[in-house]
Image (cartoon, rainbow, N blue to C red):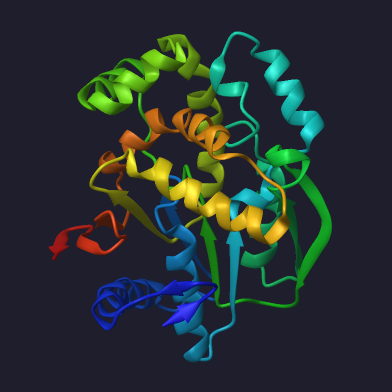
Amino acid sequence: MKKTGVRISEKEFLARLKIIKNILRRRGRKKTFFVGIGGGNGTGKTSLGVLLELVLREMNFKVVRVSFDDFYKSAKERKRLAKKYPGNPLYQIARGIPGTHRIKLLENVMEKAKKGKSFDLPFFDKSAKNGFGKISKRIRKVSGRVDFFILDGCWIGLPKIKIKNFLGEIEKNNFVNRTVGELGLKGDDFAGPLAFLGEYKRVFSRLDFVAVIVPERIEWTIEWRIEQEQRLRKRKRQGMTNAQIKEFVKHWLPFMVLYEKSKADAIIFTCKNHRIKKIKFRGQESN
C-alpha cells in the first residue's frame, strides 16, 4: 500500500490489521471513538494513522486524522516560554517540549467532536521561519459527527512519573544518559516539562484507545527525523538543517525512554526499517 510516500508489505499490513481489529472491538457502540498514536520522532506515527484512516474509510466510517503538531503555540508564545526558563536547555529549542502546545484549543476541538458538532482544525507550518515554525492561516473544517478521531503525536501514551524515577530510567540507557550530559541537563530542568505533561493528561484521558511505537534503539529516531526534514525541505524549500535537527531531537530523547513503561492499549516494538518486531496488547502479546 502506498500513501504519501509510504510503502508497506502484506506482512506488515496484516500485523497492523491486528491493531485495527482491537480498535473496532473496543469501539462497541460509541458514537465517536478517539484513537491516540504516540512515539518519538520519525517512529511512524503518521504512517500508522494514515493506514488506520484508509482502512476505516474503506469500511464506510467517517474519519478525521489530527496531528498534535498542528496545535503548537505561536512563535511569540514559544519565545516567551524560552524567556521564562532561560537556564533550561529544553525550552531553548524551537518547539516540541510540553508547554509549547495549545492544549485548551485541542480540548475544545475534541469536546465538539464528542458531541457530534462541527469543528475547525488548525495547521502549523514547521518549515516556516527556517524551521522555527508558525501557525498557518489555513484551517480545515470538519462538518458533523465523525466515527473516528485519530490523534497522533509525541507525548501521547507517556506514563506519569516522578523526577527521581524518571532520572533512574534515563541512567539505564547509555545513549540517552550521555546525551543528557552533553546537553548539560540537570534534574530540575525536567520539572517544568513534567508539570506541563500533567496538563496534557486532560487531553489524553479523552482517548479511548492508545497505541505507542517503541523502536529497539532510541538513537534511530535522530536519523529518522533527519530523513523527514529532508523531505520537508525538498517540498517547502525551507526548514532545519541536518545539524539543527540532530540538536533538536536530542532534547526529546530523555522523555522517549518512558514509552516502554507506557500503559497503552498497544505497544508496537519496531526494527530500524520500521518493521514490527512484536505488538504487546494490554493483557496479551502478539509476535
Q: Quadrant of residue 183?
A: top left
Measured as percent of width and height from the top left, residue 276 is found at: 24, 63
Q: How many marks?
A: 0
Query: Please, is residue 1 above or below residue 173 in the view?
Result: below
Measured as percent of width and height from the top left, residue 63 is found at: 57, 77
Name which residue lies at 81% across and 30% down.
76
Residue 73 seen from this side = no
Q: Quadrant of residue 119?
A: bottom right
Closest to the observer, 158 or 240 = 240
Residue 128 seen from this side = yes
Closest to the observer, 72 or 34 = 72
Measured as percent of width and height from the top left, residue 90 is found at: 54, 22
Q: Assign the N terminus to one quadrant of the image.
A: bottom left
| Left or right: where 207 falls relative to 171 | right
| Left or right: where 106 falls relative to 19 | right
Q: Quadrant of residue 221?
A: top left
Name which residue lies at 83% across and 61% down.
138
Closest to the observer, 218 or 98 = 218
| Left or right: where 138 falls relative to 157 | right
| Left or right: where 103 falls relative to 260 | right
Measured as percent of width and height from the top left, residue 143 is found at: 75, 77
Name which residue lies at 17% across and 58% down.
283
Q: Assign the C terminus to one quadrant of the image.
A: bottom left
Query: Please, is residue 182 above or below residue 282 in the view?
Result: above
Closest to the observer, 207 or 93 = 93
Q: Hey, which residue is sitting farthest right in the picture?
A: 137
Query: Please, is residue 73 above or below residue 237 in the view?
Result: above
